[in-house]
C-alpha cells in the first residue's frame, strides 16, 4: 500500500469548489481540509506508480 499527502492549489479561489468536486471523483483520494493555502488530500493506492498517475492527472487540470 502506498500513501502520500499533498496540497492541491486551485488556479483561483473561484475554481476551488470545482476542483474539490473533481477530487471527490477519484476514489483513491480523501479530502482532509480546504483553506487559504489549498486543499489538503491523502492519496492511497496499491502501488506507488498509481500515486504518480493520480498526481499527473491532477497537474493536467
Image (tube, helix red, strand yellow):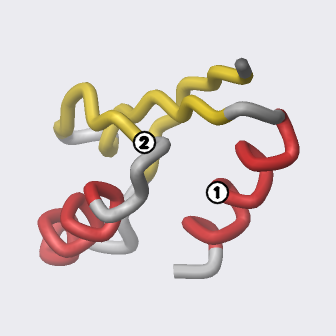
Frontmost residue, 27 versus 52: 27
Measure the alpha-carbon separation of dots 1 and 2.
9 Å
| Residue 3 drawn above or below residue 8 | above
**Left or right: 18 in relation to 11:** left
| Residue 53 appears left or right of 31 | right
Pointer 1: residues within 10 angstroms few (<14), some, or many (20+)? some
Can you say whether 15 is above or below 16 in the image? below
The residue under the point 72% across, 43% down is: 51
Image spot of residue 9 (x, y percent): 41, 54
Residue 24 x/y as whole percent: 26, 56
Residue identified by numbered label 1: 54
Q: Is label 1 in a helix, a strand or a loop?
A: helix
Q: Secondary structure at mark 2?
A: strand
Q: In the rendered picture of this protein, how many numbered marks are placed on residues?
A: 2
Q: Residue at x 86, y 46 (%)?
A: 49
Q: Which mark is residue 29?
A: 2
11 with respect to 45 (left or right):
left
The residue sitting at 63% across, 79% down in the picture is 60
Residue 33, horizontal then vertical, whole percent: 20, 30
Amino acid at each position: 500500500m502506498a500513501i502520500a499527502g499533498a496540497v492541491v492549489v486551485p488556479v483561483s479561489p473561484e475554481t476551488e469548489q470545482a476542483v474539490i468536486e473533481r477530487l471527490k471523483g477519484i476514489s483513491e483520494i480523501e479530502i482532509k481540509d480546504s483553506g487559504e493555502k489549498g486543499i489538503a488530500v491523502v492519496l492511497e493506492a496499491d502501488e506507488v506508480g498509481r500515486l504518480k498517475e493520480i498526481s499527473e492527472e491532477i497537474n493536467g487540470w
